[in-house]
Amino acid sequence: MKQIKLFLASSIVEFKTERLEFERFIRVLDKIFRPYGMELDLIECEDLPKNLTAIPAQARINEQIPECDYFFMIVGKEAGEKSMEEFDIALDSMKGSGIPKVYVYFYRLNMDALGSQSESVQQFVKRLSDDLKHYFCVFMNVDTVKLDFLMELCRDFPADIALRFEDGQAVLQNEQVMTLANVPLYGNNTELTSLKEQKELLNGRFAELCARHAADPKSAEVYRELVRVSEERTRVLDRYRELEKAIFSLYKEIKSGGAEMTWYEKEARKQVELGNYAAAVSVLQDAQRKKELEQAELFADLSLEKIAAHVRENQLLIKTLKAQKRTEENVTEIERCYKESAELTIKYHLDNQIIYDYAVFLVGTMDDYEKTIELANIMKEQVRHDDMETLGDVYQLLGEAYLVNAHKPIEGRNYYNKAADLYDRLKDSSSKYGNLIFCLERLFRSYRLDGFANYEKCRQIIDRFQNLLITKSGYISRYNRCIIYLDCSLFYNDVGDYQSFALAEEYALKALDISREDQNGLLNSCYGTLGNMYNGQKRYDDAWKYYYLRYKRCKRQYSNNSYNLDGIAFAAKDLV
């Protein structure tokens, strides 16, 4: 069991409530991380033995700090002498051994009135900014500190642990661990607030129409309005979920480390952390940035870092715009930033991640697969042959562009195969098993369309799936396991003999068990797979049972915004 130690430095009296809340949060996280071989230990001075010893209490506290992985400091009305002593010890230890990582937070109310802070706080801010060049944050609620710590844990100790924003909660391994309402980045997002209000209004309207439709099912007027409201609710919910993902992506961006930040990056990040998106965009759209880029390009050999910084600033601007209301103006600005950054990256041989992001944007948002293929081919030529992870991502992108968007199966399959082979060779990179399964699943579905002609290729993919289940079981998420089970069921059902039907049923039921327990997006596919399988075997009662379950679930999801009436009609057709 790996022990992860966190030291929390602050005034015990001023932040008594926050310290207790943080302690409860650590206990919640500890229960989630323990199955992955990690134990969280929060070091607080309150927990040290009160018995008399020859070593003074503060000295015993200070001894704990260099052994910690993280040091979080919260500053309020005063930068206390003991807290400053703890900070210096943590900083010296970080410089010497790399741990603990040091994070400093100032309470927002004490930072708003410039010049009104205590002298100790002003001196500490000046020391961090001018002398140490150490980034610090401002917070209004301890939830900001909690979320930052959670993000650091997930970044430093991945272990197949997934964090996401969903329905106003930070969700870790499918468990809600904290609300996001008090985190300004999330709570102050005006577009998200607007979508939430729209969703609640549409929910009420939809419930009213459902009642009216039940009372008068023959009313065409009520039915048409029900359809219209349902489609609007679906649109709002989809945008709400999309925006939550964009906010999470922006949050990860502003919490990432790396190169020393420019003034624009620091100021924009500060504004985003406070939930002031407009101010962040204003900073990053300052005309002076363009002038500085032009000056840097005049002396490119001596100014590559400035050019690279401009690309980073563009990337931050892109993610900030994506986390706001989608307007034609914003989309145009996003594309401009991507285009400029890609051109600079190609010209000066910078980190080509921005080219990849641009290509994904083009294929996913602009439906421009030709430009996507052009950019992906440029990346393919630039990526080192030993960088299998990046090369695999490029091949996967080309596979998607050719197979799905350009409808060129031969080229698409070729690149998906190349990507899958590279991901398969990344034995020590658990993060890419999802990509591997995605590529294999795409290939299986494509080959299956050819029928018996590609039976052998389908069988080979199923063999690879089954080998993954045996040799890499711990790295495969339940969702991806469900995908594998469904594809195995489809394959054995296609084979058609008695023994294969039994295997097809076994795999489909395994997928169903996972989907029912997790309530993931594959449950309807499980019902449909079982219904089709039983229908093919002339077990019509069993087939009707699963077709009906799919139909009922579509109706329920339809009332929860996930399906429109076309989805219900599709599910209902098999009941006839």
Image: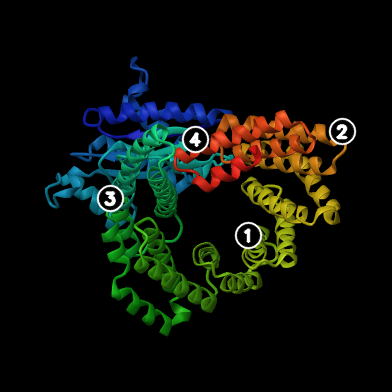
Number of residues whose C-alpha sits closer than 10 Å to that of mark 3, classed few (under 14), some (14–19) or many (20 or more):
many
Alpha-carbon distance for marks 2 and 1? 38 Å
Which is more N-terminal, label 3 or label 4? 3
Amino acid tagged 3? Leu
Residue found at x 14% / y 44%: 118
Task: Farthest residue to the top: give it.
Answer: 51
Which three-letter amino acid code belongs to the residue tagged 4? Arg
Residue 556 has which mark?
A: 4
Reading the chain from its start, which is encountered first: label 2 or label 4?
2
Q: Mark 2: few, some, or many residues within 10 Å (few <14, many ≥20)? A: few
In depth, the one of 212 and 544 nearer the eye is: 212
As shown in the figure, which amino acid type bears the numbered disc 2? Gln
Identify the residue under disc 3.
274
Q: Nearer the viewer, mark 2 or mark 4?
A: 4
Question: Could you tell me the amino acid type at mark 1?
Answer: Asp
Q: To which residue does mark 2 refer? A: 499
Considering every residue shown, the one lying at the far front of the view is 218
Assign the N terminus to one quadrant of the image: top right
Q: Could you say which disc has been placed on residue 10 in the image?
A: none
In this rendering, is residue 276 above or below 163? Answer: below
- Residue 267 is situated, as x and y percent measured from the top left of the image, at 29, 60
Q: Is residue 71 visible?
A: no
Residue 98 left/right relative to 62: right
Tell me which residue sits at (28%, 48%) in the image: 188
* Quarter in which the C terminus is drawn: top right
- Residue 383 is situated, as x and y percent measured from the top left of the image, at 64, 68
- In the depicted view, which residue is nearer to us: 106 or 438? 438
The numbered mark, 3 or 1, whose residue comes first in the sequence reads 3
